[in-house]
Image: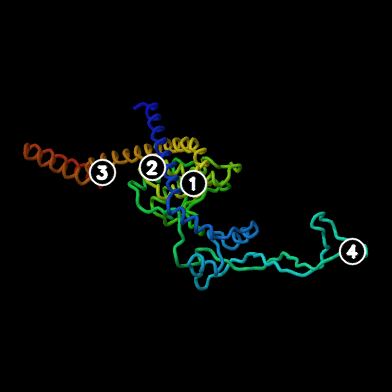
Amino acid sequence: MTDKNRNEELQKQLQEITDRLEQGVRDVFTSENYKKYLSAMSRFHNYSLNNILLIAMQKPDATLIAGYTAWKKLHGRQVMRGERGIKILAPAPYTVKRDITKTDPITQKPVIGEDGRPETEEREVVIPAYKIVSVFDVSQTEGKEIPTLGINELTGDIKDYDTFFKALCMSCPVQVSFEKISTNAKGYFSHAENRIAVKEGMSQMQIVKTTLHEMAHQKLHSGQEQQDRSTKEIEAESVAYVVCQHYGIDTSDYSFSYVAGWSEGKEIPELRDSLDTVRKASLELIYSIDTSLEEINYIMEAKRSVAIDTDKRPSLVENLHRKQEQVKARDIEFPKTGIAIMSQSVEKDRREARNSGR
């Protein structure tokens, strides 16, 4: 197959894979599980920017936040013993009675009394105020499961995992390393440090998928701050799904839900707008990974050839045994000649030793 034919065949395959991705995300949106997920998420409070910053400062890995009572009554979960609350600000307005200038309901102008002064009336006025309250992350609670869009983590092994993961690292222009990540993140790409980190202790499938996700971030979003986060996540996960599918690694259950979670609506405009970018990036990654796999296989084949050649070479002991057999064979065939030659050689050595004074 020529390079041109291979390229056309690969592009056709990627088109089919991205079509399955789009349909898979649509299926997530129309599923009963998605409705349950939305219903659960609607019961979580939307926090102000100030409170988001306070939560991030105290518990960076927080994902779902609610108060003690809300966890118990709305979600069927209990805050675990010994957990420390996250301190945020909650509205605590209070009312006071004050004399307010009376206004005409039609003209909206002050009502003037007989004495020529504006009339007043006593009204209750709401004074904005805040108090400190404690909230808790879902990781600090236990009880009824919170509905999710899909599985939380991929499981399972991959055939020839060591070789494939080595090819990923070789084809990646930045360093890939494992580390302990205290947050819920499974990996990240650091633009400042120009490296990719993957969480330790995950399954082979999750490691490969996460590595490809972060490689897509490095390839597509390095220094592109103008893109919103949802677009970046949709593109990175889509590329990871496409490349995994190409190599026979099925991440549908995880990736469809992940992309759906970052999409804004059933028409999934972000995904459709990004599909060309996804296909191009996937194509480039596949070519790069294939090149690395070919290089690894070439080196492994060369090592096997050397090992076979080495195995074929006779050892020192084998050489000695062969020489002994050869001497025996000569002695059997020419017994007198062999003995005579050996005797002459020994006698010659003795004479030379006496003459040299040894």
Mark 4 or mark 3: which is in front? 4
Q: Nearer the viewer, mark 4 or mark 2?
A: 4
The residue identified by callout 1 is: 214
The residue wearing badge 3 is 356
Circle 3: is it few (<14), some (14-19), or many (20+) Cα within 10 Å?
A: few
Mark 4 is on which residue type? Gly
In the rendered image, residue 69, in percent from the top left (x then y), is placed at 55, 69
Badge 2 crowding class, 10 Å Cα cut-off, few under 14, some 14 to 19, many 20 or more, is: some
In the image, residue 52 above or below residue 318:
below
Q: Which residue is mark 4?
A: 113
In the drawing, does residue 351 fall left or right of residue 139? left
Q: Gap in Å between the C-alphas at discs 1 and 4? A: 73 Å
Separation of marks 3 and 1 at Cα, in angstroms: 79 Å
Q: Along the polypeptide, which appears first: circle 3 or circle 1?
A: 1
Q: Secondary structure at mark 2?
A: helix
Which badge, 1 or 4, is on the more N-terminal residue? 4
Q: Residue at x 55, y 66 (%)?
A: 136
Q: Percent from the top left, x then y, of residue 355?
A: 23, 43
Relative side of 304 to 31, left or right:
left
Q: Quadrant of the N terminus?
A: top left
Residue bearing mark 2: 245
Rounded to the nearest angstrom, the CA distance separating label 2 from label 3 is 82 Å
